Image (cartoon, rainbow, N blue to C red):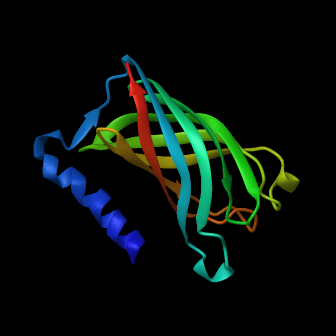
Amino acid sequence: MRTLYLLALLGAAPLAHGADFFTKIDPAPTSELWIDTGFYTAHFDGDKDLNNNNKGLALEYRFSGTLAATGGRFYNSDRAWSNYAGVIWQPYAVGPVRVGLALAAFDGYPKTRDGGWFPGVIPTLTYEYQRVGVNVGIIPNYKDRLYGGISFQLKFKLFQR
């Protein structure tokens, strides 16, 4: 229920902005450092006893209006520790919500490359207000190796120049 409420909020936010509904984000250089939590994941396969509370910690450095480098560690859905590193590319916005992809490498999933590193492409939405925000990843299922879902990650801005 909590997941549906959050999705409804994210979906309704763009409607409040009328004329600015769909915009291209300015790719100008910037400098923002965010600290990100782990994830809460609402899995599509809720009957598989997966770990929804993916505790962890990450850093996200936005170096342009459309690109951020990110890396972190979290306790994944298979109850094992995972690391990730990559970029978040978000060239568009729908109202106040940034829209794009996270392109990253992950490890720690026992059924995928025996826990080794593998690439991932995750559609990602971001909403930010002053010094707080949320990243929402839409993770696809991949055979019987990765379990898809919608992941929510809180973030807090440490500085901006």
Q: Can you say whether 87 is above or below 128 in the image?
A: above
Seen as rendered, the residue at the extreme left is: 19
Image coords of residue 128 (percent x, y): 33, 43
Hey, which quadrant is residue 91 in on the image?
top left
Viewport quadrant of the C terminus: top left
Image coords of residue 131 (percent x, y): 34, 39
Image coords of residue 18 (percent x, y): 12, 47
**Residue at figure coordinates x 22%, y 51% from the top left:** 14
Q: Is residue 126 visible?
A: no
Image coords of residue 53 (percent x, y): 58, 66
Q: Is residue 40 visible?
A: yes
Q: Can you say whether 144 is above or below 152 in the image?
A: below
Seen as rendered, the residue at the extreme right is: 114
Viewport quadrant of the N terminus: bottom left
**Residue at figure coordinates x 28%, y 62% from the top left:** 9
Seen as rendered, the residue at the extreme front is: 158
Hey, which quadrant is residue 15 in on the image?
bottom left
**Residue at figure coordinates x 61%, y 61% from the top left:** 54
Q: Horizontal placement of 16 versus 107: left or right?
A: left
**Residue at figure coordinates x 32%, y 23% from the top left:** 26
In front here: 33 or 10? Answer: 33
